[in-house]
Image: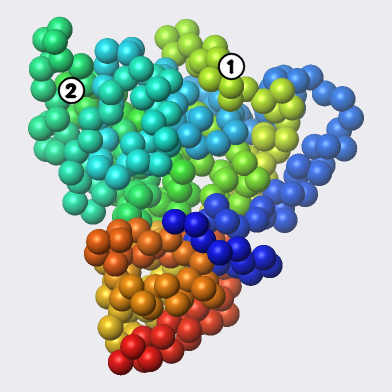
Amino acid sequence: MDLPPAPGRRTFASDNWSGAHPEVLEAVSRANDGGHVPAYGADPWTAEAQRLLAEHFGEGTRAYLAFNGTGANVVGLQSLLRPFEAVVCAEGAHIDVDECGAPERFLGSKLVTVAAPGGKLTPELVAGAVTGIGDEHHVQAKVVSITQSTEVGTVYSVDEVAALAEWAHAHGLLLHLDGARIANAAAALGVDIGVFGQAVGVDVVSFGGTKNGALGAEAVLTFRDDDSTGLRFIRKQSMQLSSKMRFVAAQFVALLTDDLWLRNARHANTMALRLGLGAGRIHGVELARPVQANGVFAVLPAAVTTALQADWPFYVWEEATGVVRWMASFDTTESDVDAFLGRLTELMAELG
């Protein structure tokens, strides 16, 4: 649904609604002061971003910077698939629901969705979708794709990701991780972002910077041999190769220097927890699931949702059940949370 504009106000609609972190903007400005530098990633900022990503994800990490999350997912998945092969993902996965069919159009591959309680896949759930292997009449499952943190705000543990990778590899499949909010998941678990890569058997990561305070910076991380992935060519053909790459790279340099990524994610998670705890104390408000990262999912009466959205834009997640989604960002403040909760309390009281 279309949401009313809220100029100058922080909202709980999405961490995509937030601006860019000042340190990110400063980094982009400094890159702009560098005069003329080689294009298409042959610049010192890109080299530094790649070094920092490899510092977290390990030796042999190859990073291909991109513009947006959908592009990073399409590029990353294309490096793992042929058109007659399929991706197994959870029902509600971003690649299936919120990317306008881009993966299927540009990959030519089928997405096979699996009902996943709490938004998380398990080896047992995936096994039920891997059928017809070797039968030329059936699409061949090749990649398992998971989202960290998930579309419903839950977080895979390190062991859960490792178990999926182990199962996938044992059955001739590969594991892709859509890490649009990987920083929030790592902060929630108290681990480094790099544990969700080759350390647990993930083959390709779509690493998200935009929701973590960047202007528009994503990366495809592969731990496979360059010659086998074709990623240099896939990224270009997929229109995700920036000519002035230094401005994308500078954002990653900022996020990965002095743990800005972690500070931003911890803050967003803390604000979401404050919001969830406060909402749970309001009579008549039900939390749809525990708050694990920076998303809060709650059940509200339709009249309250409509009235609250007039002041604080946010999205209805499930119209049939009344589930709404509130997202905290790196710039959410305690006063934002408290003001929102105050208005919600008033509306619920009016409802009786």
Left or right: residue 37 compared with residue 7: right
Q: Residue at x 62, y 22 (%)?
A: 241
For disc 1, the marked residue is 236
Residue 232 location in percent, x, y? 55, 14
Identity of the residue drawn at 54% across and 26% down = 63
Q: Quadrant of residue 82?
A: top left
Residue 135 in percent (x, y) is at: 11, 10
Residue 227 in sight from this viewpoint: yes
The secondary structure type at the circle numbered 1 is: helix
Label 2 is placed on what type of residue?
Ala
The disc placed on residue 95 is: none
Q: Is residue 199 left or right of residue 25?
A: left
* Residue type of the residue flagged with mark 1: Lys
Q: Which quadrant of the figure contains the C terminus?
A: bottom left
> Could you tell me if residue 202 is visible in this image?
no
Q: Quadrant of residue 73?
A: top left
Residue density around tag 1, few if under 14, some if 14–19, many if 20 or more, within 10 Å = some
Q: Are marks 2 and 1 in contact (CB under 8 Å)?
A: no
User: Residue, x 44% and y 56% (percent of image)?
Assistant: 1
Residue receiving disc 2 = 170
Answer above or below: position of 105 versus 282: above
Q: Relative to 277, is 23 above or below?
A: above
Q: Position of residue 183 (x, y in %)?
A: 48, 49
Up-down relation of residue 174 to residue 113 (above or below)? above
User: Which SS class for mark 2?
Assistant: helix
Foreground pick, 44 / 286: 286
CA separation, marks 2 and 1? 32 Å
Relative to the observer, which residue lies in front, 198 or 314? 314
At x 72%, y 35%, the residue is: 247
Q: Name the mark nearer the viewer: 2 or 1.
A: 1
User: Seen in the image, is 161 located left or right of residue 193?
Assistant: left
Q: Earlier in the sequence, mark 2 or mark 1?
A: 2
